[in-house]
Amino acid sequence: MMKGLKKWRLFSLLAALTVFLAGCGQEELSTLLPAGQVGQDQFNLLMLSSAIMLLVIIVVVIIYVIAIVRFRRSKLGEEHIPEQVEGSHTLELVWTIIPILLILLLAVPTVYYTYKLGDVAAMGSVDEDGNAENLVVDVTAKLYWWEFEYPDLGIVTAQELVVPMDEKVYFNLLAADVKHSFWIPAVGGKLDTNVENVNKFYLTFEKDSQNLKDGVFYGKCAELCGPSHALMDFKVKTMPRADFDKWVIAMQATDKRVADAATSQGEQLFQQSSCIGCHATSAVGETGAQGPNLASFGDRNRVAGFMDHDKESLKEWIVDPQKYKPGNKMPASTHFTDQELDALAEYLMGLSVEK
């Protein structure tokens, strides 16, 4: 009976480990599969610290096993008194010098990478014509969504960060309400977004997100910020510089967008209801809106950051957002008829710059 229980315990442990380790292979989400130089540097530091800890564990276990095997009482007898080493200068030096060396081995690269990854001196660099040499994105974290402004390009988006590959992208991080934390596990981070000060850092994106399972990298809020903290996701689309420039031009043209006949009723509802008071449908502008910018809503792969990107999920979200993301600031819209919800969903799904 006891043997059977032990087997089931072992099986349960292995099953639990399988579930936990299943997340290690998701390229769009795993820190163990870095997709940029910053992520690779942090991964190298993680492996170094893990190797040092493993070395210490192995040495301690070996000493422990030797002590058990060689000096057990049944072998040496009840009257045996081991050699007393109290006050040994050799041992004192060994267990003082070795930990210091291990700490230095970890501290030196840690300090090096801390300064390297925090170097944002080039953020404000401009060329001879006064144009910015590097892409800068202002990130504002809100309950419970993300706003991304490209100040040098004059555009704003929300929930999906779009960046070019193979170049440094600099970030200014700020929170609009409470402390959040900006983190793209596969690319690098994380760094807090505070209300009272701006944090700055950079990332590099070396893999095209189009080749990933969902076509995006996943970003997370890594600071407990309220009841819907776990649902405060954002997505990252990476693309070659030429494609990114085309995307920027398309975003800059959204202020001249005109709804077609199929979505004109939805646009009228959007303009006449309270929606327009919180959400912009043009990407041209600055940050500060009460709700997410919807200029490229049709290009997203999620509604509200985590729901399926389809009309039914969108209508459910519009009617009762608190049901799906408690604590968010979007009010319920129960006054729309089914026909009006269909028209509104059709219009919002049609807000695209990539199709």
Image: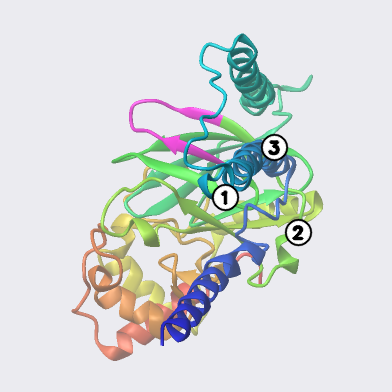
Mark number for residue 208?
A: 2
Vertical placement of residue 63 versus 332, above or below: above
In the image, what residue type sits under mark 3?
Answer: Leu
- Give the extent of the magenta segment: 189-200
Graded by Cα atoms within 10 Å as few (under 14), some (14 to 19) or many (20 or more), the crowding at tag 2 reads some
Residue 128 found in image quarter: top right
Q: Residue furthest left?
A: 335
Q: CA distance from mark 3 to mark 1?
A: 21 Å
Q: Position of residue 173 (x, y in %)?
A: 48, 35
Left or right: 119 in relation to 172: right
Quick one: quadrant of the N terminus?
A: bottom left
The type of residue carrying mark 2 is Asp
Task: Determine the secondary structure under disc 1.
Answer: strand
Name the foreground residue: 230 vs 322.
230
Q: What residue does disc 1 label?
A: 184
Type of amino acid at the residue the image marks with label 1: Ile
- For marks 3 and 1, the one nearer the N-term is 3
Give the colouring mode of the picture.
rainbow
